[in-house]
Amino acid sequence: MSIKEILRMVLVLTLVTGIWGGLLSLVKMATQDQIEYQRIKNVKAPALEKALTVEYTNDPVKERKKIRVGTDEAGNPIIRNVFIAKQNGRVVAVALEGYGSGYGGDMGVMVAIKPESNKVDGIAVTTHAETPGVGTKAMKSEAFMGQFSGKNISASFAPGGGIDAHSGATYTSEGIMQGVERATKIFSRNREKIL
Amino acid sequence: MSTIWQEFSKGLWKEVPPFRFVLGLCPTLAVTGKVSSALGLGCGVIFVLMVSNTLISIFKQYIPGKIRVPVFIVIIASAVTIVELMMEAYFYTLYEVLGIWIPLIVVNCLILGRAEAFARKNPVRLAVADGAGMGLGFTISLVVLATFREVIGSGTWFGLSVLPPSYIGFDLVQNPPGAFICLGLLLALINLISAKTESKRQEC
């Protein structure tokens, strides 16, 4: 094998991988937003629709805002999506996720808030790893999940506050309460940025 | 013109990939539980096969023989990544159903097989025809197999009910062992048909 031959092979492979790599990054950039939209639409939208009980006419997933809620240990900003529900252009509710720790680990709770009255519109669980048939009883219970609706966001939702846990699913109930508490606090702190 | 047609049509019957060469069997067995997913994967394969065949045929004289396989793999893998991104962006539900089988198009022997056996030795127009024909043949095979499995297995076709609602479905056909059984029966059927047509031709 001559040096010339080896150089030619190196050149061809470099060119091929370089050109395709560039092309792929273009495709990635072009599809990025659409992919993020689809992911949220398919993963979060079911919970979002459950949490929003008010009438709205827009697509809250499309009209989402990203807000910075703090920084993690490494100093990177923590970004959360806030979904804005509008009726004829007027904001009727905003929904955002708060995380609490349940029995099986972190659980996400979508909380919809009506900014005009500062009241919780509704809540729904997005992600969880609770025990089926035990912990999941709490998130399926209308009586438990309904307690949050209509409460002022300045109220304490933390465990031991004004919310009664679902009997037999205390850890899960407390995880949900924690999630709601955190979501409402994020909203109060970032009100101007969100609206 | 006739050779273009020849190269295109050979993939549809005479050399139909999964049944004649028994190539690309993993996806053939895995995604044929439903017609919609079979069609989705088939379209992905058509795209990848045409892109790889075209590019390899255009650049065949610049690709040194010793590194042709890595070059083919880079081209194929990139085309597959494009399919994956596009599918995730615009057909998310299909993307979720097909899951791992989209990236695995890269290792589908059919695609590398056509690149190695055909595209690197033939002019562009023939390579395009070959890619289109083989891809279409692969897709049709998948859809035929999926039709069997979906109709018998759950009484639906493309998600629409085609059998009376009292039909409870034949679960075995929907499961992996049923995929093998259906494929075997189809292979037997195709061999039977071609044996018949072959003997007829000899009688004439």
Image (tube, grey):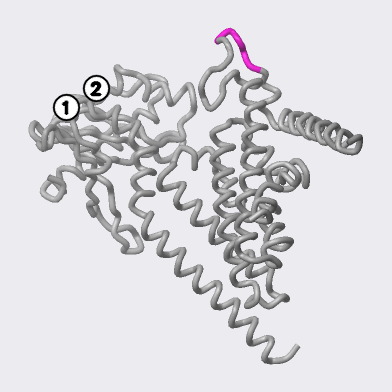
Magenta segment, prevailing SS (helix, strand or loop) = loop
Q: Residue at x 67, y 53 (%)?
A: B2
**Is the residue A49 above or below the residue A192 in the image?**
above
Amino acid type for the residue under numbered disc 2: Gln
Q: Check disc 2 and report the residue beneath it.
A: A147
Q: Residue at x 33, y 52 (%)?
A: A33
Magenta stretch bounds: B165-169
C-alpha separation, residue under disc 2 versus residue under disc 1: 8 Å
Q: Which quarter of the figure has residue A145?
A: top left
Is the Cβ of the residue at disc 2 closer than 8 Å to that at disc 1? Answer: yes
Which corner quadrant holds the N terminus of chain B? bottom right
Q: Is residue B160 visible?
A: yes
**How many numbered marks does the figure carry?**
2
Q: Residues within 10 Å of mark 2 (few under 14, many from 20)?
A: some
Q: Residues within 10 Å of mark 1 (few under 14, many from 20)?
A: some
Q: Give the chain of mark 1.
A: A
Q: Is residue B130 visible?
A: no
Is B35 colored magenta in this rendering? no
Q: Position of residue B145 (x, y in %)?
A: 67, 32
Q: Position of residue B46 (x, y in %)?
A: 58, 49
Amino acid type for the residue under numbered disc 1: Lys
Q: Position of residue A68 (x, y in %)?
A: 23, 54
Q: Position of residue B117 (x, y in %)?
A: 74, 61
Could you tell whether B23 is left or right of B89 in the image? right
Q: Give the chain of mark 2.
A: A
Q: Residue furthest front?
A: B204
In the image, B137 versus A45, the foreground residue is B137
Could you tell whether B66 is left or right of A93 in the image? right
Q: Check disc 1 and report the residue beneath it.
A: A151
Q: Which quarter of the figure has residue B56?
A: bottom right
Which of the labelled discs sits on residue A180, or is there none? none
In the image, B18 versus A107, the foreground residue is B18
